[in-house]
Amino acid sequence: MADSSFDIVSKIDRQEVDNALGQTAREIATRFDFKGTNATIEWSGDQVIEISASADDRASAVLDVFKGKLVKRDVSLKVLDASEPRQSGQSSKITVTLKEGISSEDAKKISKLIRDEGPKGVKAQIQGDELRVSSKKRDDLQAIIALVKQQDYDFAVQFTNYR
């Protein structure tokens, strides 16, 4: 029987992020507490979102609304890397970068965890910005998924290609 396997990845569902961004933009356009603050949220490149408002607290409030919309759409907040509010002329800006992919150090951490605490006979291979986990027994793979989910990493983790 061939080995069963799955991939551990850190990917962003860009469509869900785009939908959350659109919902946030509509909400700040209609909410009373954002009237007259020139609050905006928009894409600034492929992986960067720019938030601007007339004051630091209003820019932070837009970020909070955006985070709420992401949570409702099952997008992990660990993909966000938000800067502190900074003054730019008359407005305050926050730059939010979307983090995607597992770095090689993080992949090594997960691989070591699987080797040390996982069932015997489970192999983990680093393949670019993802990790392939394989084993003869599917039950062992289920145990690895449970083990990795218990850990608190500073990046979002998804499990794909389970076969």
Image: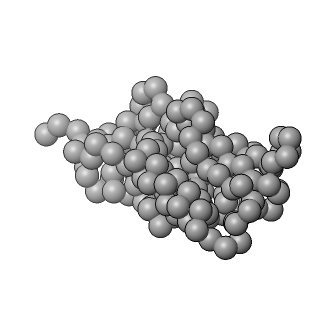
**Quadrant the N terminus occupies:** top left
| 37, above or below 116, in the image | below
x 70%, y 43%: residue: 95
| 147, above or below 15, in the image | below
Query: Which residue, as the protein is rendered here, is positioned at the far front?
Result: 36
Camera sees residue 77: yes
In terms of depth relative to the viewer, which is nearer, 100 or 148?
A: 100
Q: Where is residue 93 in the image (x, y as percent from the top left)?
A: 76, 46
Q: Where is residue 108 in the image (x, y as percent from the top left)?
A: 56, 35
Task: Judge left or right: residue 36 versus residue 68.
Answer: right
Query: Which residue, as the protein is rendered here, is positioned at the far bottom?
Result: 32
Q: Where is residue 118 in the image (x, y as percent from the top left)?
A: 45, 50
Query: Picture quarter containing residue 81?
Result: top right
Number of on-image labels = 0
Task: Judge left or right: residue 90 versus residue 149.
Answer: right
In terms of depth relative to the viewer, which is nearer, 119 or 149?
A: 149
Task: Judge left or right: residue 149 versus residue 83.
Answer: left
Query: Which residue, as the protein is rendered here, is positioned at the far top?
Result: 128
x 23%, y 39%: residue: 3
Indicate the colouring scheme. one colour
Query: Picture quarter containing residue 61?
Result: bottom right
Q: Position of residue 86 (x, y in %)?
A: 83, 45
x 33%, y 56%: residue: 142
In terms of depth relative to the viewer, which is nearer, 75 or 31?
A: 31
Camera sees residue 82: no
x 22%, y 45%: residue: 163
